[in-house]
Image (tube, helix red, strand yellow):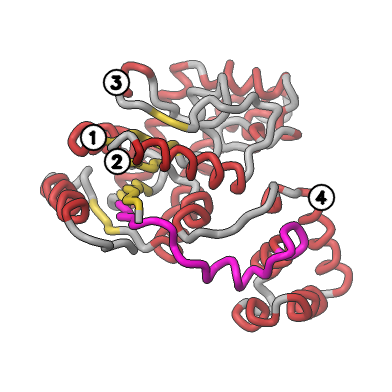
Amino acid sequence: MKKVLAIVGPTAVGKTATSIKLAKKFNGEIISGDSMQVYRKLDIGTAKITEDEKQGIVHHLINIRDIDQRFSVADFVSDATAAIAQITAAGKLPIIVGGTGFYLQALLNGLTLGGDQFESDQLRRELLAQAAVKGNEALHQRLAKVDPVAAERIPVNNVRRVIRALEVYIKTGHRFSDQTNRPRPYDAFIVGLNTDRATLYKRINQRVDQMMDQGLLDEARYVYQNGGTRLQAGKGIGYHEFEAYFSHDRTLAEAVDLVKKDSRHYAKRQLTWFRNKTKPHWYDIISDPGDVSRLNDDVRKWLESGDQSN
């Protein structure tokens, strides 16, 4: 199987800088695994890598959509699969970098996805409405009729996951339980970056302040003037928080504080997802310099070995 290196972790933990070092050391090219960096002109709020920061390393799946276009997990799997094939054929190592956990899981676990089933707000609203009117049990019974295996695994009151399983079936005709059991297509080594919570939250707050200095407000205004939260891009952290400011319902200080708060909460959700779903090899390169050497050694051993994927 093709080898794929993935670097995951919460926002502001150092994924970008680490990816460049590993790409230079192991002859790699980088594939963005971030759902927001696909959008052109959204550079600051998405912490998009600059041309200088790339240091000549080729990057894929950055700036491939306008802000009024959608980008689904199915699009990511399709585009990333093609990029992996291209990079591997060139004799280089594909390195996926990003914090959108479901993208990575869908790609590395070989989920078969059709269209934009996980982006269908209308379908999700309809299913949520059914749960609200008829109860969680009724929605769970609907899932049990089409995918009894998934229904057995998912608790009745885990409405979000019940809906996700139904979305897969309704949009693709395939059962959710079948999707998650497909053979993995790659020999993947997943690097997880993390540090202690106090340090991480401090870095997140500092990053938001730096973004404001770099012009985040102008970028958020551009999103607001072109559709705001009606756009998929406009729902991203660092953009939707300013909508109330532009409509004079929130002060600028309140909006900035909310960006910091949302970013911290998102980082917590990211860590929970990666721990439960992707189970990376964890490293703290911020607080433990020795982890840098350990990370390099582990990647080198994996590259020299057979299939050691997660």
- State the residue at coordinates (80%, 55%): 123
Q: Position of residue 186 (x, y in %)?
A: 39, 56
Instruction: State whether residue 288 appears in this view.
Output: no
Q: Secondary structure at mark 3?
A: loop
Q: Residues within 10 Å of mark 1 (few under 14, many from 20)?
A: some
Give the CA distance from mark 2 to mark 4. 39 Å
Q: For residue 272: magenta?
A: no
| Residue highlighted by disc 3 | 56
Q: Which residues are magenta?
A: 169-191
Q: Quadrant of the C terminus?
A: bottom left
Q: Earlier in the sequence, mark 1 or mark 4?
A: 1
User: Is mark 1 in CB contact (under 8 Å) with mark 3?
Assistant: no
- x, y percentage for residue 59? 40, 29
Quadrant, the N terminus: bottom left
Sequence-wise, the earlier of marks 1 and 3 is 1
Q: Is residue 301 above or below residue 216?
A: below
Residue 308 in view in this figure: yes
Find out whether the residues at labels 1 and 2 contact each other: C-beta distance under 8 Å. yes
Residue 35 image offset from top left, x and y in percent: 54, 39
Q: Look at mark 1 in the image and give the residue it sits on.
A: 27
Tell me: 17 left or right of 147: left
Amino acid at dot 1: Asn
